[in-house]
């Protein structure tokens, strides 16, 4: 059985990152008989300088991309349809506020040491897109931890300190230096880059080709 390692560079505030992983999951399920997959998540911040109170997402995105709020609403409606077909909860994605995700990324690093890195990431996606929770709020983050069955007191200790801050910064610097400027980005076996939330069939084909090279 071929072993394939996938490094995923993503942000919790990125809806295409949630969609991209759900599509990757489907591709990995199709190939499970032939390939053994391992996944590691790496931090990327779409809005690293964000501070203070969040802004409603539609006007924020309209200003960022130079488009109208109606255009952004239409784009997000399309994403909500895609997400629903993948079993993702994006019900409140248009009600969310902009936020800083740095502490959430620190918590993903911590959860990784408990074998729950992917679970933590998915819990954060659900909180932000499904419930429009503020994933910069420590109470919200601790609730995500509790939902996974991890220790909320230890999580609170992490959040109240600067633990894993260096690891997050190193992630960001490493992948910025490697040329990753947009997410999601999937690096396969440390060599091959797949950019964007590609369809499961396209991922299956690419992963099969990479797996054949390592035979």
Image (tube, helix red, strand yellow):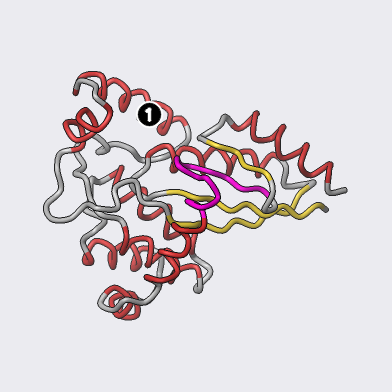
**Image quadrant where residue 142 sits:** bottom left
Relative side of 50 to 166, left or right: left
Q: Residue at x 76, y 42 (%)?
A: 210
Q: Pick the residue in front: 160 or 174.
A: 174
Residue furthest left in the image: 53
Numbered range of the magenta stretch: 175-188
Assess whether residue 183 is covered by the magenta stretch.
Answer: yes
Instruction: Classify residue 160 as left or right of residue 10.
Output: left
Residue at x 28%, y 36% (from the top left corner): 91
Q: Is mark 1 on a helix, strand or loop?
A: helix
Rendering coords of residue 213 (x, y %): 83, 43
- Image height check: is 47 above or below 197? below
The residue identified by callout 1 is 79
> Residue 102: within the magenta?
no
Q: In which quarter of the image is residue 211?
A: top right
Q: Residue at x 29, y 48 (%)?
A: 47
Residue at the right extreme, as displayed: 215
* Other-residue count near label 1 (Cα within 10 Å), few / some / many at <14 / 14–19 / ≥20: some
x%, y% of residue 103?
A: 31, 64
């Amino acid at each position: 059985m071929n072993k394939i390692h996938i490094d995923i560079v993503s942000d919790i505030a990125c809806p295409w990152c949630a969609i991209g992983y759900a599509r990757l999951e489907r591709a990995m399920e199709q190939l499970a008989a032939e390939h053994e997959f391992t996944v590691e998540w790496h931090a990327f911040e779409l809005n690293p300088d964000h501070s203070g109170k969040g802004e409603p997402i539609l006007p924020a995105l309209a200003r960022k991309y130079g488009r109208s709020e109606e255009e952004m609403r239409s784009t997000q409606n399309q994403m909500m349809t895609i997400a629903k077909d993948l079993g993702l909860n994006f019900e409140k994605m248009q009600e969310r506020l902009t936020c800083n995700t740095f502490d959430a990324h620190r918590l993903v690093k911590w959860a990784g040491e408990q074998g729950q890195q992917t679970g933590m990431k998915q819990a954060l996606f659900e909180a932000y897109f499904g419930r429009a929770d503020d994933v910069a709020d420590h109470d919200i983050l601790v609730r995500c931890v509790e939902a996974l069955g991890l220790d909320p007191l230890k999580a609170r200790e992490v959040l109240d300190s600067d633990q894993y801050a260096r690891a997050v910064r190193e992630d960001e610097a490493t992948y910025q230096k490697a040329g990753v400027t947009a997410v999601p980005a999937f690096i396969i076996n440390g060599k091959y880059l797949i950019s964007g939330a590609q369809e499961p069939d396209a991922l299956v084909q690419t992963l099969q080709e990479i797996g054949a090279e390592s035979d």
